[in-house]
Amino acid sequence: MATVTFTETLPVNPTATYAERIGFALGNLFVSAFDAIENYKLRRETLIALENCSDATLEDIGLARCDIAGIVSKI
């Protein structure tokens, strides 16, 4: 799964028109929505992978079945 990371933010132009500011806001909204979807997918994949592990495998990596929800919620 490819992850897109945006590390550069656009400076706010004080002379930008109202339409330009709306465009920047909508761009940020779509980036935030994209990030939220990617985070959800990662949490879901992790949850499924850990739930499919046997108790012996979980014990080998130092986890109990009751720890899975807490670990996934921290992602």
Image (tube, rainbow, N blue to C red):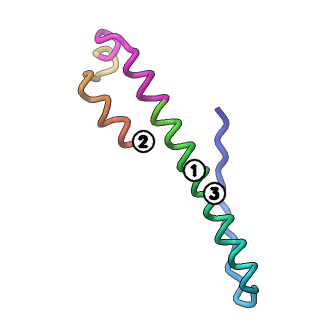
Please state the horizontal and vertical placement of residue 13, each as a whole percent of the image: 72, 84
Rendered image quadrant of residue 28: bottom right
User: Mark 1 — residue?
Assistant: 35
Q: Between label 2 and label 3, give the one nearer the viewer.
A: 3
The residue type indicated by label 1 comes to Asp
Quote the CA–CA distance across marks 1 and 3: 6 Å
State the quadrant of the N terminus.
top right
Q: Position of residue 63 (x, y in %)?
A: 28, 23
**75 falls in the magenta region:** no
Judging from the image, what secondary structure is the residue with disc 3 in? helix
Q: Image point 39% across, 22% down: which residue?
A: 50
Residue tagged 3: 31
Q: Are marks 1 and 3 in contact (CB under 8 Å)?
A: yes
User: Which quadrant would the C terminus be assigned to in this image?
Assistant: top left
Give coordinates of residue 11: x percent, y percent.
69, 76
Task: Look at the image and give the residue range highlighted in magenta.
Answer: 45-58
Locate residue 20: give its quadrant.
bottom right
Helix or strand or loop: what does disc 2 sit on?
Answer: loop
Q: Amino acid at mark 2?
A: Ile
Q: Is residue 50 depicted above or below 54 in this figure?
A: below
SS for callout 1: helix
Kindly identify which numbered label has been placed on residue 75. Answer: 2
On whether residue 48 falls in the magenta region, the answer is yes
Q: Earlier in the sequence, mark 2 or mark 1?
A: 1
Q: At x 46% / y 32%, what residue is drawn?
A: 44
Please report the residue visible at 31 percent of the width from the left and 33 percent of the height from the top: 69
